[in-house]
Amino acid sequence: MKLDHLAIAVADLDAALTFYRDALGLELDGIEAVEREGVRIAFLPLGDGTSRIELVQPTRDDTGIAKWMAKHGPGMHHVCLAVPNLESALARLVAHGCELIHPQPVRREDGTPYAFIHPRSAFGVLVELYEKPE
Ligand code: ZN
């Protein structure tokens, strides 16, 4: 299991880059606008690039992340771990009584299967799982 990304919710992506890229010194790999999800995302790889920080800025008010920010303000939103087999990871979680936001894997636009675990089961942290073959 590997850390895939840490997602940080920000109100203004360009302002956030003055810290994460300019002051902290992380590399910016690119910025993507995902219309379907109502977000702009900046990717900042760490080390060899298998893990990264993602800055996520909501671009509409009706999205999950916009609602989350309205309640919590900007800050760490979720941690994403890459697992070799998502179905078996979810089955294991269910067997341990964990509450899943996505009981079945869903797919990103690029085809990557993912699922979110409810923060109630993860001691206050929203955890995302990606399926990525090792
Ligand atoms: Zn994520």
Image: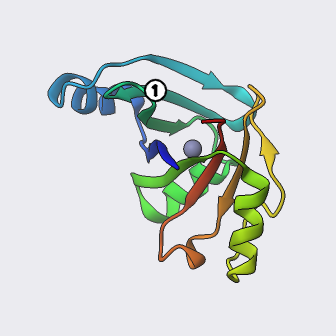
Local SS, label 1: strand
| Residue visible at 57% across and 21% down in the picture | 32
- Which residue does the numbered mark 1 point to in the structure image? 42
The image quadrant of residue 15 is top left
> Is the residue indicated by label 1 positioned so its CB lies within 8 Å of ligand 1?
no
Say which of 20 and 15 sits in front: 20
The image quadrant of residue 82 is top right
Say which of 123 and 55 sits in front: 123
Residue 89 placement (x, y as % from top left): 70, 60
For the residue marked with disc 1, what is the amino acid? Answer: Ala
| Residue visible at 38% across and 27% down in the picture | 44
Q: Relative to residue 125, is residue 97 depicted above or below?
A: below
Q: Within the displayed image, which quadrant is ligand 1 positioned in?
A: top right
Residue 28 placement (x, y as % from top left): 36, 19
The image quadrant of residue 100 is bottom right
- Name the colour scheme: rainbow
Residue 27 falls left or right of residue 132: left
Report how many numbered discs are placed on residues in the image: 1
Q: Relative to residue 112, is residue 90 depicted above or below?
A: below
Say which of 125 and 133 sits in front: 133
Residue 10 placement (x, y as % from top left): 41, 42
* Badge 1: residue crowd in 10 Å (few <14, some 14–19, many ≥20): many
The residue sitting at the front extreme is 134
The residue sitting at the left extreme is 23
| Residue visible at 74% across and 35% down in the picture | 108
Residue 130 placement (x, y as % from top left): 64, 44
The residue sitting at the right extreme is 104
Q: Quadrant of the C terminus?
A: top right
